[in-house]
Image (spheres, helix red, strand yellow):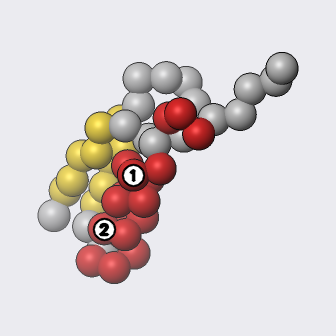
Amino acid sequence: MKIGIVGSGISGLGAAYFLKSRYGHEVDVFEKNDYAGGHTNTIEV
């Protein structure tokens, strides 16, 4: 099964990993930013 996930935050990446590793689904993750992680990204202060 082909699955598309919108957003690469912790939930999106976790869902993608689970669906791929447990069920072998073909998963594509779509993200509007140029980095993964959503609000969990790291920034320099």
Q: Outermost residue, bottom direction?
A: 22
Q: Is residue 8 visible?
A: yes
Q: Which residue is mark 1?
A: 11
Residue at coordinates 83% horizontally, 20% vertically from top-left?
45
Task: Name which residue type carries label 1.
Answer: Ser
Residue at coordinates 16% horizontally, 64% vertically from top-left?
1
Asked which quadrant contains residue 37, the reply is top right
Image: 6 above or below 12: above
Mark earlier in primary sequence (2, 1): 1
Asked which quadrant contains residue 5, the reply is top left
Q: Outermost residue, right direction?
A: 45
Task: Name which residue type carries label 2.
Answer: Leu
Say whether residue 26 is left or right of residue 21: left
Q: Position of residue 25 (x, y in %)?
A: 26, 67
* Secondary structure state at the residue bearing disc 1: helix
Image: 22 above or below 4: below
Q: Is residue 36 visible?
A: no
Q: Which residue is mark 2?
A: 19
Image: 9 above or below 43: below
Q: Outermost residue, front direction?
A: 45
* Secondary structure state at the residue bearing disc 2: helix
Frontmost residue, 19 versus 42: 42
Q: Nearer the viewer, mark 2 or mark 1?
A: 1
Residue at coordinates 71% horizontally, 34% vertically from top-left?
42
Q: Position of residue 29 (x, y in %)?
A: 36, 44
Say whether residue 29 is left or right of residue 4: right
Asked which quadrant contains residue 41, the reply is top right
